[in-house]
Image (tube, rainbow, N blue to C red):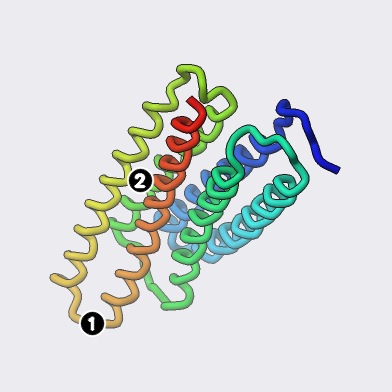
Amino acid sequence: MFSITPRDKTFFELFERGAALLIRAAEAYSQLAQDFEHRADYVALIRQLEHDGDEIAHRTYDHLDRTFITPFDREDIEALIQRMDDVIDEIDAAAKRFDLYDIPASTPALIKQTDVLVKACHLTAKAVGRLRDFKKPNGLHDDLVDIHHLENVGDEINHGAVADLFRQESDPLVVMKWKEIYDLTERAIDGCEDIANTIRSIQIKNA
């Protein structure tokens, strides 16, 4: 049965639940980088959060199939929930590399990267929450600008970390392993910018 009411708040609730998972996954990954001795616990938590994110994505698609009137374009709803899921997937992929590659310790560069990621995910969650009233001046524009700025900061940290790898590390396998971890972490930060771009598109289309 189709819903015909535009007052359906289910999508916003699902978006906000997905955004909350972003924060939890980013914070767990940051804790992994700083408390490396207990990394297995954080990897397991991130793995569970990845499953939870998949469930929210499936529920969103299912609700979209059953809803006639949506708060904004269907393709934007799909893009938003998918891009949130993608960020958690990148975090999960990076976290699993520590056991897969038998990484013995964290690095200062990774700690900096994960700090940026946490900030980006918090801002992303704020922006997602503002979608309920995105037609009103509510700080959304500033949040999106700040996310873009953090993506640039993340790029700089990633470039510096990779450059240091090539300058300081003689073992090509170590270089390969860490470059992949840094790149996956940067892709998670990039994913927050992708979410910001989707939200900006929604805002423009519905202005």
Quadrant of res 58 = bottom right
Please name whichever residue, 161 or 9, is drawn nearer the observer in this view of the structure: 9
Could you tell me which residue is drawn at 37 percent across and 46 percent down?
Answer: 115
| Residue 15 shows in the view | yes
Q: Nearer the viewer, residue 207 or 186?
A: 207
Left or right of 125 on screen, residue 173? left
Residues at marks 2 and 1, CA–CA distance in whole angstroms: 28 Å
Residue 104, position in %: x, y?
Answer: 38, 72
- Local secondary structure at mark 1: loop
Residue on which disc 1 sits: 171
Q: Which mark is residue 116?
A: 2
Identify the secondary structure beneath mark 2. Answer: helix
Three-letter residue code for mark 1:
Asp
Whole-percent x and y of residue 101? 42, 78
- In terms of sequence position, does the residue under pointer 2 or pointer 1 come before the other? 2
Question: What residue is at 64 percent from the left and 34 percent from the top?
Answer: 12
Vertical arrangement, residue 154 with respect to residue 139, above or below: below
Q: Is residue 26 left or right of residue 4?
A: left
Q: Is residue 10 above or below residue 62?
A: above
Of 170 and 86, nearer the camera is 86
Estimate how packed mark 1 is, as few (under 14), some (14 to 19) or many (20 or more) residues with alpha carbons within 10 Å. Answer: few
Amino acid residing under circle 2: Val
